[in-house]
Image: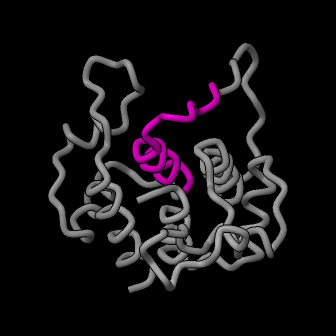
Amino acid sequence: MDNNDILIRLRYALDLKNTEMVEIFNLGGVDVTKEDVLKILTRTPDEEDEDAVHADEHISCSNNMLDSFLNGFITFKRGEQDPKPGQAPPAPVQSNQNMYNVLLKKVKIALSLTSEEMLEVFDDGGIRVSKAELGALLRKKGHKNYKPCKENFARKFLRGLTVQYRG
């Protein structure tokens, strides 16, 4: 599952409109148009897939672009937050970083989900996650209890969001 798939699934789960997607990208510091959003929300071209769009009709979503979208999503849902004095800005996402952990953390913040609500989302997605596992997934990389989030967890989380927000 690449970053474009994450955006497609997140958009569907939370029933976001194209104009809202443009606004969220802009809040995150990425200037896109409605046409660009439509190109981002297309399936990634694959040489074997005849139904996939052509490369010129597709915009690949980088880790930085997805991170900016998620930051904009937090601002969209919770409002602009003034930086605290002496607080350093968040470090930029690395190009090879696993974005699944970032997705879990930032969606949790944006939707103001508690740990119990996160566990319910995973349960609705069809996977049992313990509190300890969830805590490990939400830890900062480099922490001794950090656990990288696998694709299956991210898929189940997005499926659980779909069940909770779309019924």
Magenta run includes residue 32: no
Q: Position of residue 149 (x, y in %)?
A: 31, 43
In the image: residue 74, left or right of residue 96: right
The quarter of the rendered structure image containing the C terminus is: bottom left
Q: Position of residue 110 (x, y in %)?
A: 56, 53
Residue found at the far front of this picture: 47
Tell me what residue is drawn at x 30 percent, y 27 percent.
146
Tell me what residue is drawn at x 35 percent, y 56 percent.
154
Q: Is residue 39 above or below residue 6?
A: below
Foreground pick, 131 / 3 = 3
> How many numbered marks have been drawn onto this rendered protein structure?
0
Instruction: Indicate how the structure is coloured in the image.
Output: one colour
Q: Position of residue 144 (x, y in %)?
A: 27, 17
Q: Position of residue 2 (x, y in %)?
A: 47, 57
Q: Is residue 124 above or below residue 127?
A: below
Magenta run includes residue 108: yes
- Quarter location, residue 42: bottom right
The quarter of the rendered structure image containing the N terminus is: bottom left
Q: Main secondary structure of the magenta part?
A: helix
Q: Which residues are magenta?
A: 91-110
Tell me what residue is drawn at x 74 percent, y 41 percent.
81
- Quarter location, residue 152: bottom left
Tell me what residue is drawn at x 37 percent, y 18 percent.
142
Q: Is residue 66 above or below residue 22?
A: above
